[in-house]
Image: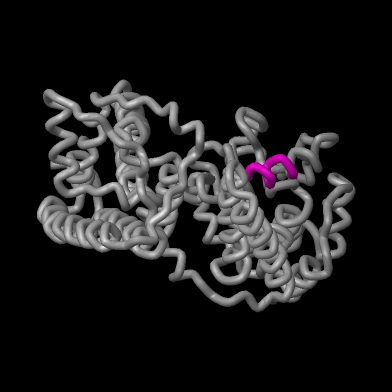
Amino acid sequence: MNPSREPGLIRRGVCWLLLLGPLFFLSYGLANNHTAGRTDVGSLVFGWERGMPLWPWTIIPYWSIDLLYGLSFLLPRTRQEMDRHALALLSAQVVSVACFLLWPLRFTFERPELGGLFGWLFDVLMGFDKPFNQAPSLHIALLVVIWTMFARHVRRQPWRWLMHGWMGLIGVSVLTTWQHHFVDVPTGALAGFACVWLWPHKGRLPWQQARLAQDAKRWLLALCYAAGALMCAMFARVLGGAWLWLAWPAVSLGLVALNYSVLGAGGFQKGSDGRLSSAACWLLAPYLLAAWANSRLWTRRHPQPDEVCDGVYLGRIPGRPADARFPAVVDLCAELSCAAPAGAYQGFPTLDLIAPDITLLQQAANAIERLRAKGPVLVCCALGHSRSASAVAAWLVLSGRCSNAQQAEAVIRKARPGIVLHHAHRQVLHQLGAQP
């Protein structure tokens, strides 16, 4: 037995399967039967889908998700990881079935008669499946949850590439077996990633860190992002067609608005390795792409970090392989992943345009002083102008290199003139300097 695994996980996994298996067939079957009796079931299919080929052999990878569903319960190493994986699968099922009942769609292609093994597998499938449960594809939603679990634990090559290839083939098979129309795939992936984000394999759950923002600026930014989300959603609904892709930035901006209003920096799910969770990366992809481009645009004329003093540098968040000369990184950015050295990374995620609180600045300052023993330290945020500058200022004051916040700001501004410290930043730094 793997000594890193908690005892009793096999029994726990079997119990979850005994619960989830019957619940799946019961809820899926009832939704199918209910929708089959309705007369208001429409369809959403693009004209180009008429050319989608039927590959009967892909029924094999399509069916294989059932095996992988069960095998995925052998991979967790802790009870928490096991339970959250099961809850993510359950959530994907609940969300998809609810959508089937509220917004039912019908698959419109007529599959020809097929013989042999592939034909038999199709016949078995159609024995309990009906062409009514479409968007979001429950098959894709479950695939995302299962794929995330396997990707976390299958690390050795060539098994990792084989695993990714087979999972990708399962995703394609929902189209080439004529089980789903295209719109079902991205909506299913969205549902799956939302469930993985809702139940991260470690750390606090999103709602466990939920707290209404007390800062008026956070609410203002939340309203701006919410307005952007609403605008994208309206265009997607009114224009349809390819404009439906605007639903993705709508979800992305909506989640950012939720982070600013309630969840805080933890909603970005940035881990101790400097990376955002895979679920956060996919859900927030449109926003993250814009945030990354913005960070590079604003710093294009001054991309390099600047030494403030004693081996402490201030700059923008490093990309790969840039800034590899820094053996230690202190990161104040919540929304962007950081390419940082292993073992010498300290993250203190802070929302963009929001001043870090006094406790976080104290922790960041202590980390800067501690990591200086490893060599030059890069203190960074998206631009290297505000959040990271506040952390360096706190370090200068708490380490005694500067007597007050004004002097610390002057030292930093001399090294990096582009820093931006607003009243909120200065207020926190003054409170920090006033502490005994």
Query: At which x and y percent is residue 286?
Result: 61, 46
In which quadrant of the rendered view does residue 317 lie? top right
Question: Which residue is rendered at x = 25% and y = 54% of the image?
Answer: 82
Res. 399 in view: no
Towards the viewer: 104 or 142: 104
Question: Which residue is rendered at x = 30% and y = 44% of the image?
Answer: 146
- Asked if the stretch drawn in magenta spans residue 203, the answer is no
Q: Viewed as shown, does residue 54 lie left or right of 380? A: left
Labels in figure, total: 0
In which quadrant of the rendered view does residue 298 lie? top right
Query: At which x and y percent is residue 276?
Result: 51, 47
Q: Residue furthest front?
A: 39
Q: Split into 4 quadrants, where in the image is the N terminus?
A: top left
| Predominant SS of the magenta segment | helix
Position of residue 169 relative to residue 203, above or below, is: above
Towards the viewer: 127 or 212: 127
Query: At which x and y percent is residue 8?
Result: 12, 55
Position of residue 257 relative to residue 317, above or below, is: below
Q: Residue furthest top?
A: 158
Query: At which x and y percent is residue 383?
Result: 75, 46
Question: Which residue is rendered at x = 58% and y = 64% of the image?
Answer: 259
Towards the viewer: 207 or 183: 183
Q: Viewed as shown, does residue 267 lie left or right of 305? A: left
Question: Which residue is rendered at x = 86% and y = 64% of the image?
Answer: 406
Res. 282 in view: yes
In which quadrant of the rendered view does residue 153 lie? top left
Towards the viewer: 182 or 5: 182
Q: Viewed as shown, does residue 2 lie left or right of 198? A: left
Query: What segment is highlighted magenta in the picture?
Result: 288-294
Q: Split into 4 quadrants, where in the image is the C terminus?
A: bottom right
